[in-house]
Image: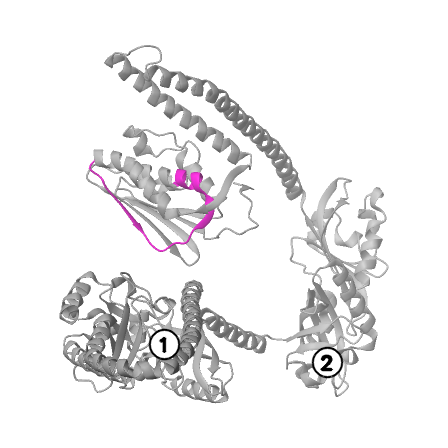
Amino acid sequence: MLLFVRHEAQVDAEHELTADANRSAATIATQLRPGDLAAPVRDAQRLRELDALFEPELMDNVIRVKLWRADGTVVYSNDHTLIGSQVDADDLAKPLAGQPVREVGHLNDEGGTGENVKVISAYVPLRLKGESQPRGVLELYNDYAPISAQASSTVKPIAIALGLALVLLFASLFPILNQVTKALEQRSKRLEKQADELERTLNERRQAVASLRDAETRYRALVEQLPLVTYVSAIDKPGFSAYVSPQIEGLLGYTPDEWLATPSLFWRVVHSDDVERVRTEHRDGYAAGRAFSSQYRLVARDGRVVWVEDQIIVLTDAAGNPVQAQGFLLDITHRKAAEVALADSEERFRTLVANVPGLIFRCAIDEHWTMEFLSDEIEEIVGYPASDFVRSKVRTFASVIHPEDASRVAQDVEEAVQDNRPYTVEYRMVHRDGSIRYVVERGQAVLGRDGQSKLDGAIFDLTERWQAESERMKLAAIVESSDDAIIGTDLEDRITTWNRGAERLYGHPVGEILGHHFSFHIPEEMDDERPALVARVVAGEDIRSFETVRVRKDGTRVDVSLTMSPIRDADGSVVGVSTIARDITQETRARREREELVTELEARNERLRELDRLKDEFVALVSHELRTPLTSIRGYLELVLEGEAGDLTDDQRQFLGVVERNAHRLLALVGDLLFLAQIEAGKLSLEIGAVDLSAIAAESVETARPLAEEKSITLTLATGPLALIAGDRARLAQLLDNLISNGVKFTPAGGRVDVRVRGQRGQAVIEVRDTGMGIPSEEQKHLFERFFRAAQATEQAIPGTGLGLAISKAIVHGHGGQITLASSEGSGTTFRVSIPVRQMQHEDVEQAEVAS
């Protein structure tokens, strides 16, 4: 009876707690903003406003309040450490459906600060002003002790009355009570054991929840580093995303909060020409309950059209019903552009082939000349369609080559393939109607995709030209008016034609030379040359620009360049040889003089390179020898300045300070010279490690700030998101020091120097922009040369050695990057450095030798 009374009292208290929570939700909802439930509240001003709003609720027994978003995220709590924490959205299903929920537990079961007292919490739906459906859930934590005390106070009078009655019954019931007591003790022990097991189970559940949250945090961190957009969508709510990664902003210009707060945003940004297809593909994929992919266009906030590939995995419940979709969006805009460009290129190729005055082919190098591609013009030449020859489907290409020319064509092509050179061969083809067509083929061997050599070439129909010129073929090889010697001979090498150019070159008039053998113009030591050349021409070979020596009538020798070709009759048979000889005596003499001059220049260049090498060795040696005494000087200066040799007067300390500063400058100069010597030797040594480029930039800016403030120069630094990169920290610091100090040195008082460091498309980008004197365009190409100084810097006596930019360029190139500048005289200068972002790998060595 006491338990029943206590239970009823406790139930009444819990119902009263629920009613209070509903009243609080109704009161607070009128003052909440939609944005308060869209994302965890981080704004300090809004936090103070919400703290003040909920302060009246934190009275009586209420010790904590939570405001839950529908996806299980805490968007506000009077314990600010809980803002942003999450639970499974299913835990809020009942309150969101309008059913209040009460739970008994401890205050910090789901995290938080303060004493972990026993509490009873009430979850009630929260509807914003003017809305019929719950937007979130309000949870109030009440101290359990007062509720327990209230139940106890209700039970106490009844307990006293029952106690008196029980005393009267005790004497008669003592034996029974003794047995009952023992039974209750055993039951109590069992209940305590069960309670311990329940506590262990609850602790294990809490640990599992904590582990799950930790895993979710790591998973999100990993996902948000990928070069794609990851998302989770509800299948029963088209267009509603439960999660979207931050990469969505880079892809489309919308923040994740905007995306999640606007359920229909996805369908608004799908391109209008693709939206129906995408809806169908998603609907069919979800219904099938399997993974699927889709390609479509999205319209970014700035109007850009972005092609994406959507890879989607459908998650199902235990019964196999689709409940959720997980996927990622990959930007394929560049790939789509490449596909369009490829299609355009193929179309241009087909148009080009169609307009070529001949046929284009690719074939295998075999006995059939098996065609892989053959343009349609083949039908005009032989009367058969191109499809007959492709893969030798109906007939082979060899079958339409004139039988008398087939072996010669094969031999010419084989020799060209072996010599890896283009070839040109003329031959006859047999038309479908039996007529003969004369063609010329030009081609070359190439390597196909299958690794086999192929022939690419073109064939041109010469039939009409051949027929028109057949009657005058002999005369066509001799141009009487030419200044060159044009000579025709028969197959026995007797002279048949001799033009005036030949008379001038060799000194023989035509009347005394016709019918004579050509050999009398050949020097005795070259008797075998002419017969070999004639044999090659008779075999069908054209000889061009063959340089040799011939003998004039007066016995003097002349350097000539010969072009020899066969003379054919109407049937195409070789009946003689046409020789064109051009006097190249002056050209030969000039070429010899040029070759001698080139040889002399090469010798001088080699001497200059040797002198440059010796100079570099000398600079490195002197620099090395200077470093040792300079180090000793600095050491003793430090001892003197520290008073090791006795007290110093102010003047002595001032003078020694000047010595110390100049020793530092000289040591830095020696270091620069040694560094340049390493670069010239191709042995730039870099200590590779994980480098925070933004931190280095901040240090360099602070180092240069005193000088900038002394000149009243505004020095600023702006950094963007940039991961750690693999690089040499000291050298990168030297690079930034050089660029920033140059900007300050060459900027007049009152100017500004702006430094920017950011990541951009896989590159770490550094920009140093000043409003200084600028650099004339004619001097910019020399700016990265050793010891070069701009004319204005020299005129204005601005200190410097001319080594800083040469060293900076070497450091950038050593990291695989580039350095450029943009400047105009009187308008300032901007140096831009881009270095590939390459994060450290386990196999990276700590020191790398790279060429400058």
Q: Is residue 824 magenta?
A: no
658 relative to 687, above or below: above
Q: Nearer the viewer, residue 654 or 274?
A: 654
| Closer to the camera in the image, 193 or 76 | 193
Verify whether residue 722 appears in magenta: yes
Residue drawn at the location 35% of the way across and 77% of the way down: 89
Q: Quadrant of residue 789?
A: top left
Which amino acid type is shown beneath numbered disc 2? Arg
- Rounded to the nearest angstrom, the CA distance separating label 2 from label 1 is 57 Å
- Characterize the local packing of mark 2: few (<14), some (14-19) or many (20 or more) Cα atoms within 10 angstroms: some
- Say which residue appears at 18% left-offset and 74% top-offset: 33
Element on which disc 2 rests: loop
Q: In this figure, which residue is indicated by the disc labeled 1? A: 242
Q: Position of residue 35 (x, y in %)?
A: 22, 73
| Vertical arrangement, residue 850 with respect to residue 205, above or below | above
Asked if the residue at tag 1 contacts the one at tag 2, i.e. Cβ–Cβ closer than 8 Å, the answer is no
Left or right: where 375 falls relative to 185? right
Residue to which mark 2 is pinned: 391
Mark before the other along the chain sequence, 2 or 1 = 1
Q: Secondary structure at mark 1?
A: strand
Identity of the amino acid at label 1? Ala
- Stretch in magenta: 711-735
In the figure, 589 relative to 834: above or below? above
